[in-house]
Image: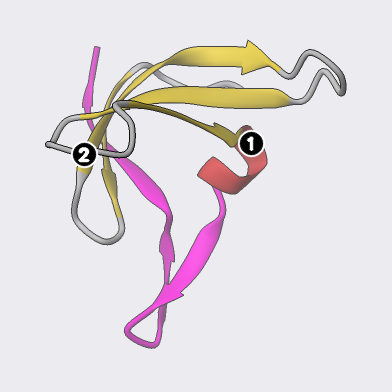
Amino acid sequence: MEIKKGIYKHYKGNRYRVLGVAKHSETLEDLVVYEALYENELSKLWVRPISMFFEEVEWDGKKVPRFKLVSPE
């Protein structure tokens, strides 16, 4: 699965910049590496399995994408 670099909006409203895809060192699973574009004291950089990044979640009774591309690079 491929991912476009750029700015994504999380279904809860925050925005993130996708930096690329990394491999898990043990399982070789694809992980999306992304940066929070807001103040976050826990971490600025995050990773998530690519399958989870693209999955749909239920929000306000509707199925919506977890992340949506809003500005490709």
Observer-nearest residue: 41 or 27? 41
Q: Does the magenta stretch include residue 36?
A: no
What amino acid is found at the position of numbered circle 1 in the picture? Answer: Pro
The colour scheme used to paint the residues is secondary structure
Q: Residue 49 carries which label?
A: 1
> Residue 35's x, y, as percent?
31, 24
With respect to residue 11, does 69 lie above or below? above
Residue at 87%, 23% (x, y): give it: 27
Q: What type of secondary structure mainly makes up the magenta span?
A: strand
Residue that sits furthest to the bottom in the current view: 61
Circle 1 packing at 10 Å, graded few (<14), some (14-19), many (20+), is some
* Residue occupying image coordinates x 42% and y 56%: 65
Residue 4: x and y, percent?
41, 19
Q: Is label 1 in contact with label 2 (beta carbons under 8 Å)?
A: no
The question of residue 67 being in magenta is answered with yes
The reply to whether residue 1 is in sight is no
Tell me where the magenta segment starts and ends, as one range. 54-73
Q: Within the image, what quadrant is residue 62 found in?
A: bottom left
The dot on residue 12 is none
Residue 70 coordinates in the image, percent (x, y): 21, 36
Mark 1 or mark 2, which has the lower sequence index? 2
On screen, residue 66 above or below 30: below
The residue carrying pointer 2 sits among few (fewer than 14), some (14 to 19) or many (20 or more) residues within 10 Å by Cα, namely few
The quadrant holding residue 18 is top left
Judged from the image, the secondary structure of the residue bearing numbered disc 2 is loop
Q: Which of marks 1 and 2 is in front?
A: 2
Residue carrying label 2: 40
| Residue at 77% over, 25% down | 29
Residue 24 percent across, percent down from the top left: 74, 19
Give the CA distance from mark 1 to mark 2. Answer: 20 Å
State the residue lying farthest toward the left: 39
